[in-house]
Amino acid sequence: MASNSFGSIFKLTSYGESHGLALGGIIDGCPAGVPIDESLVQIDLDRRKPGQSKITTQRKEADKVVFHSGIFEGKTTGTPIGFSIENTNQRSNDYSHIKDSYRPSHADFVYDKKYGVRDYRGGGRSSARETVARVVAGSIAKQFIAPIHIQAYVNQVGTLRLDQPYTTLDITQGEENIVRCPDPIMAEKMINYISEIKKKGDTVGGVIRCVVKHVPVGLGEPVFQKLHANLGAAMLSINAVKAFAYGSGFEGAAMFGSEHNDYFNADGTTKTNYSGGIQGGISNGMDIYFDVAFKPVATILQPYESLTTEGTLEETHGKGRHDPCVVPRAVPIVEAMAALVFADHLLMNRNTKI
Amino acid sequence: MASNSFGSIFKLTSYGESHGLALGGIIDGCPAGVPIDESLVQIDLDRRKPGQSKITTQRKEADKVVFHSGIFEGKTTGTPIGFSIENTNQRSNDYSHIKDSYRPSHADFVYDKKYGVRDYRGGGRSSARETVARVVAGSIAKQFIAPIHIQAYVNQVGTLRLDQPYTTLDITQGEENIVRCPDPIMAEKMINYISEIKKKGDTVGGVIRCVVKHVPVGLGEPVFQKLHANLGAAMLSINAVKAFAYGSGFEGAAMFGSEHNDYFNADGTTKTNYSGGIQGGISNGMDIYFDVAFKPVATILQPYESLTTEGTLEETHGKGRHDPCVVPRAVPIVEAMAALVFADHLLMNRNTKI
Amino acid sequence: MASNSFGSIFKLTSYGESHGLALGGIIDGCPAGVPIDESLVQIDLDRRKPGQSKITTQRKEADKVVFHSGIFEGKTTGTPIGFSIENTNQRSNDYSHIKDSYRPSHADFVYDKKYGVRDYRGGGRSSARETVARVVAGSIAKQFIAPIHIQAYVNQVGTLRLDQPYTTLDITQGEENIVRCPDPIMAEKMINYISEIKKKGDTVGGVIRCVVKHVPVGLGEPVFQKLHANLGAAMLSINAVKAFAYGSGFEGAAMFGSEHNDYFNADGTTKTNYSGGIQGGISNGMDIYFDVAFKPVATILQPYESLTTEGTLEETHGKGRHDPCVVPRAVPIVEAMAALVFADHLLMNRNTKI
Amino acid sequence: MASNSFGSIFKLTSYGESHGLALGGIIDGCPAGVPIDESLVQIDLDRRKPGQSKITTQRKEADKVVFHSGIFEGKTTGTPIGFSIENTNQRSNDYSHIKDSYRPSHADFVYDKKYGVRDYRGGGRSSARETVARVVAGSIAKQFIAPIHIQAYVNQVGTLRLDQPYTTLDITQGEENIVRCPDPIMAEKMINYISEIKKKGDTVGGVIRCVVKHVPVGLGEPVFQKLHANLGAAMLSINAVKAFAYGSGFEGAAMFGSEHNDYFNADGTTKTNYSGGIQGGISNGMDIYFDVAFKPVATILQPYESLTTEGTLEETHGKGRHDPCVVPRAVPIVEAMAALVFADHLLMNRNTKI
């Protein structure tokens, strides 16, 4: 099934695996005349890039994007924007041990069963390297949706969690440290925690919170394309994501209607925001905020038992260069997917003929 | 935007509001030759029906489905299945007070801003009455996907929560009581709790857990249509849903890779199932399970402040016939949406030319 | 495959066979606030209706449309418009002879091979009765696209052809006679010709020309959704259509560039219109015109050889109530499909964020 | 609107203009395990390549395709196939005269009105250079759909037309001469004719006939995705195409049902094939054949009047390197688009769960 496209009108189609010649994509449906600063795209790529700090994988990739079409004299032309990113640092031999066996909690097993063939040089299309195309497209989308502004940050790493609401934080501070947590004290704890885990060859999960400001009233379609349903699908399509919650989330399930209802101010804003800026699937102009939970990376640098393609269990020792915790690098990916959703809904939201 | 369709190949398109002539839909893409027992569809509709017990709204609707096409001599013909359900019990005057004002945490405000017009007789397309079409289509989908089996149940109402994993419960017992919780003792507590809340004119949220068994290995598409991304989108498109989590969910974020990894048995099954039956977006043959959080119903039979269309705040007292807690009636809706996702992925999962 | 939808944003999904309870459809994506005169829909249905004159089938159908949703107080609400048309005049026994055999140049054979089952009471989904839903949706689309105006007429029946260009005719006169040809003398010839053919139990083909006026510059998408590609697909999806040509059509293939080029006037209009109002797939503001060729109806009231499901040939004699020539009744169908294309392209044509 | 994708399951998304860095595309939905001979793709590209003979444009392009992903060890992996073709021979100055004016019967005028910006270095996305991506994808599709076999040839150039049916010709002989007409005598006439026209700086249209053999019974969806409707849309999306006809085409409109019906042989084949291998939109196993009419190229090397962006008319003299007749180079494009349609329909044609 053709399933490598995201969006209805502002649409990304992506291609590429961890060990091919290049990855890339096509952004189709971006209106003409949008000013594009390509250096902003590279900044987002660098926020996602491997090897950016001591708590990420030490694998190095230049991750330089090349645009092939669709941008002329600094503006979009309305034609599809093709782009590619070369794979420059492939150590295929790092992966040679997985040709004939399936790693636990990886996609090796299901890919082989589904497709009958597998590019055993790496995770193939299930590798998070795939998300590089999302970041490029999301960065273009951010420029299109302005002044809508998206900022994500790390809210939890393992058992370390920021308990205050985002409204009490200066969330832009997340970009000031390598773990991308806006509270400097918690950030330091998280960095130390991840460093310890890395030393043991283990990994840990985390939670990213994303806040979207300056959303106009009226984005979202009432039934199957509710704004939060599309945001949820976007987040759940990112590697390693296990859960999505917006507004009151799971906590809302324990509340009474009399406390959960967001009462109006006379200007149409609301006094509280348990709704998370969305009512009936449609933005109400308040901030939109949501949480995205990531499981720990499956590749651990410890001994473990894998399943051979022959159907026997064998002791293996993990190797390669992997992230001890994905959430610091996943922050721009969460933002990118959110930006794609908002770009699409801005274009979907056409209710008059004009 | 045309957004009233769900699915890529097995596709439901629905129509209808709470106060029109009828609601209904078209199921397109169901293969020919599927035996259909229409009485099973009515059973699912009755599980969703208002007025079914003392803890649901007392509004009565017959909710009888009529099939117009696509089924002949007890089997699908491969042509689209058109169906409708009449609206029989509309008390439009119950809603007359909302013509000129917006209820808090309802979609009234955003609909008016988005569309410029609103069918003020009820919630219109944002009413949960819309889900009746989902239940019909989901029930057809259940018959198509057999032997894949879907069973949902109520796991939490307000602060009352079942803490044991589904594997220690006989989850079919959920259907034995009106709150649809498979633990009889907890069920009774929940029923009493909802009854108390109803007396106060208040409402409460809850969580539904859904378990899917006998899923073949290989369903799900690797990138944007990961099986759980489609399940999440399906659940988040249901009215009042605030969160979705599968497998280890938010708890997974606090775990180490060494404890979260699901190690293989020699037959390809796994010793644990933190993955929730899905790896890299593709089913691995283990049970798929997920949680869906519902906020409390916004309509409370208490005084509250609403916003008039003129931009002033006014004291109102909620009226009408509403559910104190939606989760008992939402169980078949969750199952229906899950069934639509599996029907679609069974048909998407075509990797050879044959 | 789910293939019963037409359009990207303004989308019709239809259902129904010649011999089920009802036919109908859902129009999704029509913006809110469009004034709808339901009587205009019925007028178009009556133009398509069987039994309307001596040169059509004598089968009678009321073809009364019932709208279930999406229109409130005379305007669209932006929600899906569900509608149905009952089947009232089914003489299933007329078709009993086709249960075990395949009629030549009908879809019986291919349906049985494709689906394994067939509703043998009629043509099922391949019956032109299916087009009733197109006419309803097209008639709503016509009201949405105004002032764009669509007028089709019969240009050829068998070997009788109007050779003058549409610009020399008052094409609205087509509606003044039962064959829908705007030249009264040719119309009478065509009526007599069809009457003669009907007496012999034979049938004949024809050509419909369609003219679209007041199209703004800029409709159509450059590559795969060229305006004329979507018009062609729309027309070729109508039963019995064998060819589509716009502007200079097949004649254009014999011309030189120096004679075919449409030179500009200073106001951007062109001196000639071989382009048919479309350049590079995009409307240029000139009239759009195209021809649609229909083959003769396959059902003839004469002896012929059919193929039994057992694989033997047998002599049969055609019966039932069928059209000797479909083009008079197909005029509103051509217009309806064109209207759906223009409604969709008006909504697709969004190149700025607004 | 995102409109640069073609197909529902086997889907090409393309990008690129005549004067950007590169053109390319992504083929999504090709099943895993299809053996791919990349040299066959290059052969098709060479059949389309500019500068291939004295009767085509003398512009030279290497048109070497590079595959970035999706093919591993000579087989498809089921992941998207990304590819690009560099633009190597851009003489932007050839086009400098069109920056401030609109050429007649080109898309310059409508692009500027639609998008507000235009890459004035060339035809941009409306340039037939865009079709290079179609040929790559179509060539992959050809390898997937085997043994279905597609062969197109030139049937008409200007007023020179082959009148015999394809069944009396050895149509593979079209590849033996530079005009791609399978009758050697007619081919020579056509070559001389085009050479004469080229000398005058003029251009001429033509017709391509395409024949598809070994199609299984059952491809095509009954209503809006009839096999010939999809073929028609595919052909009409090619630059310069004005008309599409299959089977009896426009001639069918002049025939009686008694002569047009294709009577069965006992094996399910038919004695005649006016249906063109398709009944009710579904293939019946007979050859599928259709005609595609191309208008003359709009760029003539003669004086003509263009419209300035200021709204005045000015005398211009055409320059650049253009084709005097597109049909010889369009043969592989027609085949490619047909192959994409068949690949898609093979995958859509899933009527059982398996």
Image (spheres, coloured by chain):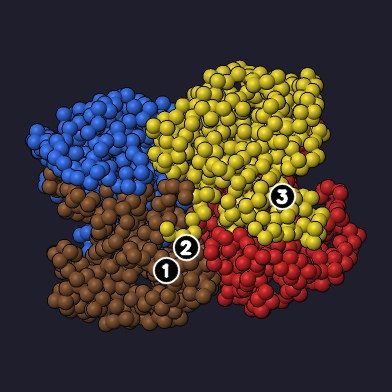
Chain colours: A red, B yellow, C blue, D brown
Residue neighbourhood size for the residue with mark 2, other residues' Cα within 10 Å, grouped as few (<14), some (14–19), many (≥20):
many
Q: Which residue is mark 1?
A: D140
Provide the secondary structure element on which disc 3 rests: loop
Q: Amino acid at mark 1?
A: Ile
Residue neighbourhood size for the residue with mark 3, other residues' Cα within 10 Å, grouped as few (<14), some (14–19), many (≥20):
many
Query: What residue do we see at 80% from left, 61% from top?
Result: B258
Q: CA distance from mark 2 to mark 1?
A: 9 Å
> In this figure, what is the number of numbered marks?
3
For marks 2 and 1, the one nearer the N-term is 2
Q: Which chain does the residue under circle 3 lie in? A: B
Q: Which residue is mark 3?
A: B247
Q: Amino acid at mark 2?
A: Cys
| Disc 2 with disc 3 on a shared chain | no
Residue C67 seen in this snapshot: yes
| Vertical relation: C276 (above or below) B186 | below
| Vertical relation: B210 (above or below) C242 | above
- Residue closer to the observer: B249 or B202: B249
Q: Quadrant of residue B18?
A: top right
Decide if residue A58 is on the left or right side of residue A63. Answer: right
| Vertical relation: A121 (above or below) C246 | below
Check if mark 2's residue and mark 1's residue have beta carbons within 8 Å. yes
Query: What residue do we see at 65% from left, 58% from top?
Result: B268
Q: Amino acid at mark 3?
A: Gly
| Vertical relation: A251 (above or below) C60 | below
| Disc 3 with disc 1 on a shared chain | no
Residue A329 image point, x, y percent: 74, 64
Provide the secondary structure element on which disc 1 rests: helix
Q: CA distance from mark 3 to mark 1?
A: 39 Å
Q: Which residue is mark 2?
A: D30
Q: CA distance from mark 2 to mark 3?
A: 31 Å
Residue B122 seen in this snapshot: no
Query: What residue do we see at 8% from left, 36% from top?
Result: C200
